[in-house]
Image: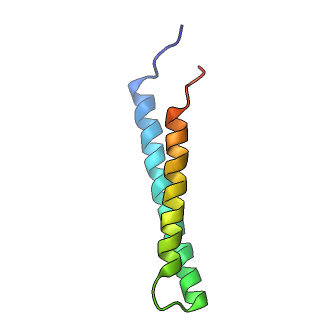
Amino acid sequence: MTAKPSQSNQYLKYSGMALQLFALLAIAAWLGQKLDQWVHTPQPYFTIALILLFTTGFFYKLVKELNRKDES
């Protein structure tokens, strides 16, 4: 017999995911800007590349986690 997760647990889970995404994007943007300054690129190539890379990785992890069946 499995119990359904409470509604508040679902809100906490998804708000935590949103905070993770925000933090990852902030880190990617900061790191990309530092790399662009260090390499002296004319356009923010590293910033864009890192934001896309981190976002792709986050959504890959998100899909894997949502498709996983809870074993509770």
Tell me if residue 14 comes above or below residue 5 in the rendering.
below
Residue 12, by quadrant, is top left
Left or right: residue 6 versus residue 50 is left
Say if residue 37 shows up in the picture.
yes
Of residues 29 and 46, the one drawn nearer to the viewer in this rendering: 46
Please tell me which residue is depicted at 53% across the width and 63% down the height of the picture. 53
Tell me if residue 69 comes above or below residue 30 in the rendering.
above
Residue occupying the far top of the picture = 1
Whole-percent x, y for residue 31 in the image: 57, 74
Whole-percent x, y for residue 48 in the image: 47, 73
Tell me if residue 25 comes above or below residue 9 in the rendering.
below
Please tell me which residue is depicted at 52% across the width and 90% down the height of the picture. 41
Whole-percent x, y for residue 44 in the image: 47, 82
Q: Quadrant of the N terminus?
A: top right
Whole-percent x, y for residue 71 in the image: 60, 21
Please tell me which residue is depicted at 47% across the width and 46% down the height of the picture. 17
Of residues 63 and 33, the one drawn nearer to the viewer in this rendering: 63
Please tell me which residue is depicted at 51% across the width and 33% down the height of the picture. 67
